[in-house]
Amino acid sequence: MKNLTQLEKQVVDAIKEGDYYSGYPYMHHQDIESITLIDAKTSRGVYASLIKKNILEKLEDCNGSFIYLLGFDEDEL
């Protein structure tokens, strides 16, 4: 199990409730921030930390909006 901060857990839990792509949950950054009530600046730090921990992957949709995809095995968290 990876060590996650409280904010990281909030983001991961929010994304788990999102849509799925190829079996992995994902969510637009605006939706994550709306659900978690974490401001955009703080969220960027949380996303960067989760990416560094290989829990999150950052993608860009056709409109140039960022999408975050959880790319892990549920047993790892």
Image: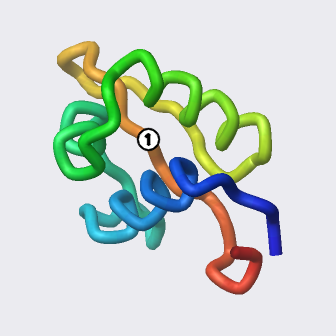
Looking at the picture, tell me which residue is in the foreground, 53 or 5: 5
In this figure, which residue is indicated by the disc labeled 1? 68
**Residue 3, image x and y in percent?**
79, 62
**Residue 23, image x and y in percent?**
45, 72
Q: Tell me, what colour scheme is on the image?
A: rainbow
| Residue 35 shown left or right of residue 53 in the figure | left
Q: Quadrant of residue 61?
A: top left
Q: Quadrant of residue 10?
A: bottom left
Q: Quadrant of residue 14?
A: bottom left
Looking at the picture, tell me which residue is in the foreground, 13 or 51: 13
The residue sitting at 81% across, 65% down in the picture is 2
| Residue 22 shown left or right of residue 47 in the figure | left
Looking at the picture, tell me which residue is in the foreground, 76 or 6: 6
Work out which quarter of the rendered image holds the C terminus and state it: bottom right
**Residue 28, image x and y in percent?**
27, 38
Above or below 67: residue 7: below
What's the residue type where badge 1 is placed? Tyr
Above or below 53: residue 17: below
